[in-house]
Image: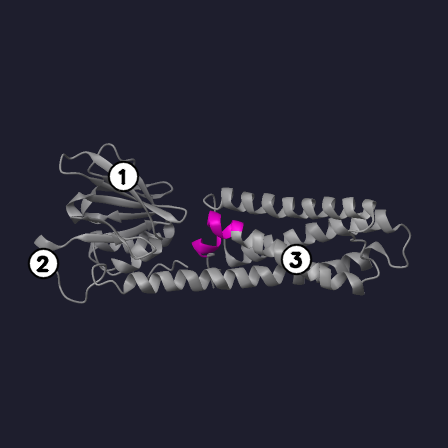
């Protein structure tokens, strides 16, 4: 079974910042509870040397988390982050911080009855709690927020309607995450919609035929679900295309490519996940499997 992808709401800029901030605060509270019961805890604020060492280690640990999450954010579009990869990434953060703490402990405490591996093992356990718990809580919080936004947007009759709409009156109406109407346009004017972190860019032509871009805060997944079974089709993790604007569908060595009927727009790549869904609009056949986007 294919390992599912991590939802975009876990990899957004603000979500990553929120996760790091909450994890640091949780870890500080946890360490203050843990220190009095530990034989190898050298954290302290009274002694000037220990105070400087405590500050230095805390800053180092925070910088490790920030650097890790920045790297995650920078590389998220280079490959598909699966749950297994995301879990491994988080575990490596814990391992690195535990290794740094063990090294500092050996240097600060001097000779100890415990071996470095014993200290590392115990540190790894406590670090897993200090960071693992806030990771889980932050993930569940962002999942609930994302679900509530999707439900709220799907409740707007202007976004999706069970009643058939006459072609001449049909409009593509887009709301932001707060439920505010931001853009309404005819399908004939829409070319494609592009994901940009927690925003989407809508590419369309105005009444003069000039290509325009409109950005609003909304998830591409929400748009995909809102306009399912219409001419708006997901062709890539970052793109939803208006099939009626496709001029040429061509097969290249790395997959299918869509040329739209506007020379200002670069060709859009069709990724393997969405190939069957896109081809069904040209062959008239239903896709064997619905593309899954978590």
Could you say which is closer to the camera, residue 55 or residue 106?
55
The residue to which callout 2 is attached is 166
Which image quarter is the C terminus in? Answer: bottom left
Task: Look at 50% across and 55% down and name the residue there.
Answer: 82
Residue 163 located left or right of residue 193: left
Can you name the residue that lies furthest to the bottom here? 162
Q: Residue 27 got which mark?
A: 3
Is 102 inside the magenta-drawn segment?
no
Could you say which is closer to the camera, residue 157 or residue 179?
179
Q: Secondary structure at mark 2?
A: loop
Q: Residues within 10 Å of mark 3 (few under 14, many from 20)?
A: many
Query: In the image, residue 16 lies at what x, y percent?
Result: 52, 50
Task: Look at 85% across and 48% down and name the residue there.
Answer: 108
Q: Does residue 80 show up?
A: no
Residue 146 located left or right of residue 233: right
Frontmost of labels 2 and 1 is: 1
Q: Secondary structure at mark 3?
A: helix
Q: Does residue 151 show up?
A: yes
**Measured along the vertical axis of the image, is residue 144 above or below residue 202?**
below
Q: Residues within 10 Å of mark 2 (few under 14, many from 20)?
A: few
Task: Look at 77% across and 44% down and name the residue there.
Answer: 52
Is 11 inside the magenta-drawn segment?
yes
Q: Residues within 10 Å of mark 1 (few under 14, many from 20)?
A: few
Sequence-wise, the earlier of marks 2 and 3 is: 3
Query: In the image, residue 213 lies at what x, y percent?
Result: 27, 39
**Measured along the vertical axis of the image, is residue 59 above or below residue 125?**
above
Sequence-wise, the earlier of marks 1 and 3 is: 3
Distance from disc 2 to disc 3, alpha carbons, whole Å, reads 57 Å
Q: Which residues are magenta?
A: 7-17
Query: In the image, residue 84 lies at what x, y percent?
Result: 55, 58
């Amino acid at each position: 079974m294919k390992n599912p992808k991590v939802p975009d709401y876990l990899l957004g800029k603000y979500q990553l910042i929120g996760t790091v901030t909450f994890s640091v605060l949780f870890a500080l509270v946890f360490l203050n509870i843990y220190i009095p019961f530990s034989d190898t805890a050298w954290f302290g604020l009274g002694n000037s040397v220990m105070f400087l060492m405590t500050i230095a280690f805390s800053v180092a640990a925070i910088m490790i988390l920030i650097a890790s999450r920045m790297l995650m954010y920078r590389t998220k579009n280079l490959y598909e982050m699966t749950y297994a990869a995301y879990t491994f990434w988080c575990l490596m953060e814990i391992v690195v911080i535990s290794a740094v703490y063990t090294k500092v402990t050996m240097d600060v405490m001097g000779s100890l009855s415990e071996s470095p591996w014993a200290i590392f093992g115990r540190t790894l356990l406590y670090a897993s709690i200090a960071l693992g718990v806030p990771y889980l809580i932050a993930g569940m919080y962002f999942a609930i927020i994302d679900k509530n936004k999707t439900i709220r947007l799907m409740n707007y009759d202007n976004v999706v309607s069970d009643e058939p709409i006459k072609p001449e009156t049909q409009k593509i109406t887009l709301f932001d995450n707060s439920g505010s109407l931001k853009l309404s346009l005819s399908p004939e004017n829409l070319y494609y919609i592009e994901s940009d972190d927690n925003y989407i860019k809508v590419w369309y032509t105005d009444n003069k035929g000039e290509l325009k871009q409109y950005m609003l805060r909304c998830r591409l997944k929400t748009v995909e679900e809102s306009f399912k079974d219409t001419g708006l089709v997901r062709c890539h993790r970052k793109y939803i295309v208006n099939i009626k604007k496709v001029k040429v569908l061509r097969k290249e060595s790395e997959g299918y490519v869509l040329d739209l009927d506007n020379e200002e727009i670069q060709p859009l790549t069709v990724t393997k996940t969405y190939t069957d869904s896109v081809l069904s609009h040209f062959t008239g056949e239903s896709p064997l499997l619905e593309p899954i986007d978590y």
